[in-house]
Image: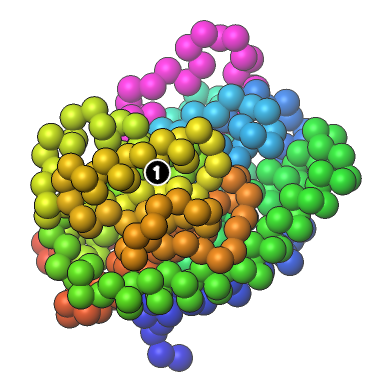
Amino acid sequence: MAKLTMMGHIEDTARVLQRAIDERKDYGQEFIDFWQNNNFKKVIFTGSGTSYNAMRVIRNMFVKLLNVEGVAIEPTVFTYSENINPSSCFRNDQVLVIGLSQHGDSISTCDALKRAKDEGFATVGISEEQNTAITKIADHYVHLVCEEEQIGPETRGYTETLLQFYLLAVEAAHQTKLIGKEKYNQLISDAQNLVNDFPTVVKESSEWYEKQQDELVSMKKASIAGYGYNFPTALEGRLKFFETFGRPTTAYEQEEQLHGPIRAYDEDNFIFLIGGNNGPEFKRMIDIAGYYRRAFTKHVFVISSAKATEDKRDLKFSVKTTDLLSPIFYVVPFQVLSAKLSEKVGIDTSVSPVTDRSISGHMNG
Ligand SMILES: N[C@@H]1[C@@H](O)[C@H](O)[C@@H](COP(=O)(O)O)O[C@@H]1O
């Protein structure tokens, strides 16, 4: 079978999202039983790269649906600089550490789980690849049904992981009676609607790119801002731009962008504002977009599904989802831009430009 391109993975995502829904009893029941048999009050979420950004989104889902304290942290900071239960207001058996590594062999994430386990905390490892280091270190394991990605920059895996853990949180919330049948059905139908509408999001993102390809391809530096549930989306957009198109990119929480970074902005900055979730920040985003356009650059792109600003550069999706699921939709334009801009300028995203591999973040190079 021919290797899927980056765009091919993005277009194939709806299929594995459907798998996440259909197979949730298979990959999920062990985790749900484990959750039910414990009384976790604090969950630490860790992972590297795209997996770190995924963990930040999933942290928000768990806090919202399962009423736990949630901490998302970079694994190496966790391993060497973090006190796991500093106030001791939880018993140690009420703290769970979850590590995600799609390939299962990131040194950082495995070390973090090792530390947690050595100190007697419960651990869950998540990966797509089976029989890898992470599956042996953690005392519980969840297999991702995103299927192996055939190129380095992860897209399908990120998106599928978010839905898979949303569903696990919904199931756990239902089975522990935090939510009733009606709420459960609503949350599951939100997920199904999202999967049904996902191809539209990919299509509209691609059309948006094609419409302004000439402008986008001239991008030399970018900054992405998001708020609330989509702040991690900005972080993931930054990573995608870096690891593919290779243009310097920053990612800020929307309000934070005003505190210093703007001093470096000029007419060459391309600014992407993610208005994917509700909240007072949405109105603020509209004002900020106008300000950036007046004060710095015409290259301001607002992405939302509600009426935001009136500019030909904006992307307005014709479909909507819930705030909690919105990171699954709003990462797509950044994945599509990364794939298509790279292709346009002749960057092959299936080949890593790194030639000296004497240091690697992965055990298997
Ligand atoms: N360039 C890749 C990233 O795209 C990936 O997110 C990260 C973590 O990988 P894993 O999820 O397998 O731990 O590893 C590499 O550095």
* 334 on left or right of 279: left
Name the quadrant containing residue 40: top right
Q: Is residue 304 visible?
A: yes
Q: Is residue 339 above or below residue 93?
A: below
Q: How many numbered callouts?
A: 1
Q: Which residues are magenta?
A: 75-102
User: Would residue 69 appear left or right of 351 to someone viewing this image?
Assistant: right
> Residue 146 vs residue 347: left or right?
right
- Determine the image quadrant of residue 310: bottom left
Pick the front one: 246 or 280: 280
Residue 58 in picture, x, y percent from top left: 55, 43
Residue 84 is inside the magenta segment: yes
Picture residue at 69% right of the left edge, 37% below the top: 65
Residue at the limit of the structure toward the right, as seen here: 181
How crowded pointer 1 is (Cα within 10 Å; few <14, some 14-19, many 20+) is rated as some
Q: Looking at the picture, does residue 351 appear above or below residue 294? A: below
* Label 1 C-beta lies within 8 Å of the nearest ligand 1 atom: no
**Quarter occupied by the C terminus:** bottom left
Q: Secondary structure at mark 1?
A: helix
Q: Nearer the viewer, residue 42 or 244?
A: 244
The part of the image, by quadrant, that contains residue 289 is top left
Q: Which residue is mark 1?
A: 286
x and y, in percent, of residue 196 in the image: 66, 70
Q: Is residue 6 visible?
A: no
Residue 120 lies, in percent from the top left, at 55, 25
Quadrant the N terminus occupies = bottom left
Q: Hey, what amino acid is under mark 1?
A: Ile
Q: Residue at x 73, y 66 (%)?
A: 22
Residue under the point 40% across and 76% down: 207
